[in-house]
Amino acid sequence: MSTAVLTVAISVTLIAGLLAFTIVSLYRHRLSTAALSAAGLFATIHITFVALAWSELAIAYLDAPLTVQRWEVAWPPISSLSTMIYDAPAWAAIISFMMSVVLGAIEWKRRRAAEKEMAAFLKYLFGGNEDTKPEKSEED
């Protein structure tokens, strides 16, 4: 199989898998996990776009006249697409990653507060709230 075909197949599989994982995480209300997988999804899309642009540049360079290949003339443009199309997934990946860090910290703090509340409730429920100091006897 051709390397280009394998690269496209792996990219599509990775993007589809990350998209499915993001949707499942959102459905289960795991926002920090969903944001982190979305960051991976956007980073993969960005890398795919850049790889396609460099592939297009290599094809344009090899098809160019010999004078262009000897650096006497400016290189052909990397891609017909605007730079914004390549930068948008990268910025989305950075923003999604930062959101996952913030949401993860919030989730961790809420979990710790819930654990403390549950420990206090169980302590109250099973009689652990009484003073555990031994009473002094009259002989002491």
Image: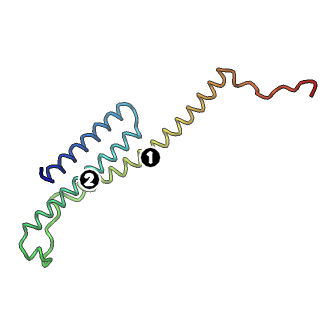
Q: Which residue is mark 2?
A: 46
Q: Is residue 73 above or below residue 3?
A: below
- Pointer 1: what residue? 101
Q: Residue at x 11, y 74 (%)?
A: 68
Q: CA distance from mark 1 to mark 2?
A: 21 Å
- Amino acid type shown at disc 1: Val
Give amino acid for label 2.
His
Q: How many marks?
A: 2
The residue drawn where x is 30% and y is 54% is 90
Position in image of residue 45 (x %, y %): 25, 49
Q: Residue at x 51, y 39 (%)?
A: 108
Image coords of residue 37 (percent x, y) = 34, 43
The answer to whether mark 1 and mark 2 are in CB contact below 8 A is no
> With respect to residue 86, does 73 lie above or below?
below
Q: Which mark is residue 88?
A: none
Q: Secondary structure at mark 1?
A: helix
